[in-house]
């Protein structure tokens, strides 16, 4: 089986590229992030015509996650247990000037109800694997409420993921997506450019590493350990031709699933050409389960 994750940065704008990638790569299950559309706006027909079922959760023109599968979709969950919401009643904070992804606008404040759970996590069982498509909050700026939200979100996901393994050590789980964390200095073209900004803080890196402590293996680095291997390049300042990239798209897998991963490819060519996303697909080859 072939699993992949890709922040497509608007599925409606790039549906032809996404479907072409699926057909060219023969990917069985694709975890999609930043669809930027409501459920009724998702271009389901194009995926179905290519032989894929789709599950999606999206509430607005921001965030949004989906899974496209040609090996079945079952037990769809539009959030993970304990997933925190976010609302901020004050005016939007100034955008972080670090050369990372542009943050989305503030959601409306809801003072008399719990903060709304954003469309950032979608889980489904596909071909015997519990796949989660994840779009981790950006964080915006150190000290911004969104930064605290990001850390709380990662902590809650880690606790949920640890619970899944506690309940079933043989579980086949893939936590795939845009993590908005730069775990190592060698995962960014210039660490000095991020000094004092999000994505590289000790707290974010610790929250990311905690998934390994919970029993999961980040298989993309295991199979592609080379330094300065990137999955994202900004649209500005000729970042892609100059290879000014970031490595922020990852796949943490449960022990039994990690044992089945035989290879990983970062499809750098998908950053080329007209209408490319600023991220590229990360593809996992998974062997059949042992009999």
Image (cartoon, grey):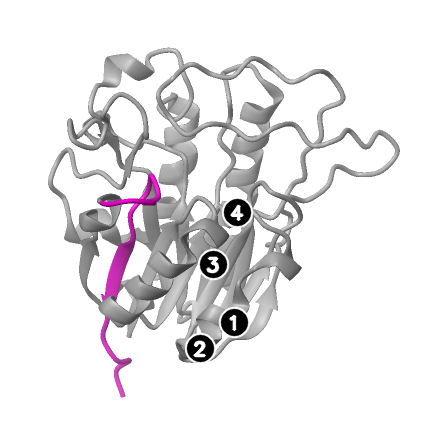
User: Which residue, given by chain and number where applicable, does mark 3 sit on?
Assistant: 132
- Evaluate if marks 2 and 3 touch, with contact meaning CB atoms under 8 Å apart: no
Closer to the chain start, of discs 2 and 3, is 2
* Secondary structure category for the residue under label 1: helix
Q: Name the residue: 21% across, 19% down.
A: 190
Q: Residue furthest right?
A: 112
**Is 72 rendered above or below residue 185?**
below
The N terminus sits in image quarter: bottom left
Q: Main secondary structure of the magenta part?
A: loop
Decide which of 170, 57 is in the foreground and name it: 57
Kind of element beneath mark 2: helix
* Residues at marks 3 and 1, CA–CA distance in whole angstroms: 22 Å
**Residue underneath mark 4:** 157
User: Is residue 168 something one can see in this rendering?
Assistant: no
Residue at the spot of label 1: 45
Q: Quick one: label 4 or label 2, which is nearer the N terminus? A: 2
Name the residue that disc number 2 marks.
49
Would you say the residues marked 2 and 1 are in contact, meaning their CB atoms lie under 8 Å apart? yes
Report the residue at 25% width, 44% height from top. Answer: 271
Name the element at disc 4: helix
Quarter of the view holding residue 197: top left
Residue at the location (40% across, 44% down)?
178
């Amino acid at each position: 089986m072939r699993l992949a994750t890709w922040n497509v940065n608007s599925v409606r704008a790039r549906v032809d590229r996404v479907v072409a990638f699926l057909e060219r790569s023969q990917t069985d299950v694709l975890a999609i992030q930043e669809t930027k559309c409501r459920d009724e706006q998702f271009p389901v027909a194009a995926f179905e015509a290519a032989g894929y079922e789709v599950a999606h959760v999206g509430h607005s023109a921001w965030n949004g996650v989906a899974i496209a599968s040609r090996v079945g979709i079952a037990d769809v969950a539009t959030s993970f247990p304990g997933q925190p919401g976010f609302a901020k009643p004050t005016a939007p904070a100034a955008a972080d000037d670090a050369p990372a992804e542009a943050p989305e606008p503030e959601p409306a404040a809801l003072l008399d109800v719990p903060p709304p759970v954003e469309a950032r996590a979608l889980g489904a069982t596909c071909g015997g694997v519990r796949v989660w498509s994840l779009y981790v909050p950006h964080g915006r700026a150190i000290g911004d409420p969104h930064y605290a939200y990001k850390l709380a979100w990662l902590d809650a996901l880690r606790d949920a993921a640890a619970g899944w393994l506690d309940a079933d050590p043989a579980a086949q789980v893939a936590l795939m997506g845009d993590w908005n964390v730069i775990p190592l200095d060698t995962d960014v073209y210039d660490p000095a450019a991020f000094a004092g900004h999000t994505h590289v803080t000790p707290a974010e890196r610790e929250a990311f590493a905690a998934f390994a402590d919970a029993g999961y293996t980040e298989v993309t680095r295991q199979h592609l350990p080379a330094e300065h291997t990137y999955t994202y390049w900004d649209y500005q300042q000729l970042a892609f031709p100059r290879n000014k990239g970031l490595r922020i798209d990852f796949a943490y897998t449960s022990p039994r699933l990690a044992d089945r991963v035989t290879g990983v490819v970062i499809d750098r060519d998908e950053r080329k050409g007209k209408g490319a996303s600023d991220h590229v697909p990360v593809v996992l080859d998974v062997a059949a389960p042992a009999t």
